Image: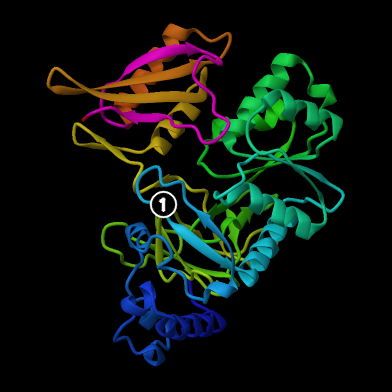
Amino acid sequence: MEMKQEQLELIRHQLHRLQKAGGFYAKRLEGIDIDAIDSQQAFEKLPFTWKGDLRDAYPLGLQAVPDEEVVRIHSSSGTTGTPVIIPYTQQDVDDWAEMFSRCYSFAGVTNKDRIQITPGYGLWTAGIGFQLGCERLGAMAIPMGPGNTNKQLQMMIDMESTVLCATSSYALLLAEEIAKRGIKDKIKLKRGIIGSERWGEKMRRRIAEELGIELYDIYGLTEVYGPGIGINCKHNCGMHIWDDFIYIEIVDPKTGEVLPDGEPGELVITTLRKQGAPLIRYRTHDLTRIIPGKCACGSKFPRIDTIFGRTDDMVKVKGVNIFPSQIEALLSGIEGASSEYRFVIEHIDGKDTCRLSVEIEEGADRQDTAKRIGAAFKGKIGISVAVEAAAMGELPRSEKKSKRVFDNRE
């Protein structure tokens, strides 16, 4: 994607500021002549930033403004290592609210809507981000947070919520509970804003059909504001990215080479206006592509494809690389197989073994469906797997993100 002149100017301003601010980026940019970065090609020679760099900067090595300008911090969960602490200035908070409000508008949400927010609040960026955008838009926020499904459904009915904000896992759980309790006629939902985890087409269809709503993918990550830096429009052909706040690149995950529009690779983000903790060429690990051309909605904002995996969620079994997105795509093409699965890898008696548990839709022949899943896995992914047919609702549900791949090898 061609860099705009105003983006280049904003980046140069950021780089000058970071060189003077001290901390992580002052060291990273040491010896670099910022004035010589006068083109996209020159910018692409700057070093990448990695998640490991951000962890090494713990707790506040990324901070690029004085303490008195920081109004809040957010943090990654730290479940896979040292957490990443991101400080925000008031401008950062306002910019985030503006982007999120724009997301709601793209999804057809107005200030007449009642938005039920189920993602978590606190250090995590999700819940408070959904609320910021809701308040900026002028809609009614119903800040439930996660869990307590009975209370969620009661408030959804009593408050006549029209928009549900949730992870795909929790949206599915709520949809199943609504169907189980026979209360769909009492639900006024029209739209769902879904984020925080990747989800397959089959899961999307289940949620949309069971709740009778339009679904929108919202994108973001803690290191870059949080959710709200992009969303799909009603045409559902990729997520529009707010390129007046961030600049995106797609690179080869192995070589770091910038790839042409349309080619899949790893998403790299540079923040254009962020003050508290700007990021330069941050490798997100998310795999996607820039969609060429204009969207049918007429928006000027560029699009990336739905995230189809992460460079760090791959598992290797018997020399074969397996991504969760491959399993989801495989199941979506098999009649009778639901969207819910659990893939377990273990090392037993000196060899790796794989077990795939899949919920089979009611009315489908479990044995036959399991056999077809096993054959498809061998044919498309390249290894044999023991398939276990589960009843609908048998596999665990989550109120947050669902973990579906378990590598139990030591």
| Residue 216 drawn above or below residue 353 | below
Of helix, strand and loop, which one carries label 1? Answer: loop
Q: Main secondary structure of the magenta part?
A: loop
Q: Is residue 106 visible?
A: no
| Residue 245 drawn above or below residue 358 | below
Image quarter in which the C terminus is found: top left
- The residue under label 1 is 83
| Residue 353 drawn above or below residue 12 | above
Is 2 displayed left or right of 80 in the figure? right
User: In front here: 342 or 297?
Assistant: 342
Q: Position of residue 272 (x, y in %)?
A: 53, 74
User: In front here: 57 or 256?
Assistant: 57
Q: Is residue 40 visible?
A: yes
Q: What are the residue bounds of the magenta stretch?
A: 381-409
Q: Position of residue 264 (x, y in %)?
A: 40, 55
Q: Position of residue 199 (x, y in %)?
A: 52, 37
Question: Splitting the image into 4 quarters, where does residue 206 fall?
Answer: top right
- Tell me what residue is drawn at x 34 percent, y 47 percent: 81
Colouring convention used in this rendered image of the protein = rainbow
Q: Position of residue 345 (x, y in %)?
A: 28, 26
* Magenta residue check for 395: yes
* Magenta residue check for 175: no
User: In front here: 107 or 291?
Assistant: 107
Q: Amino acid at mark 1?
A: Pro
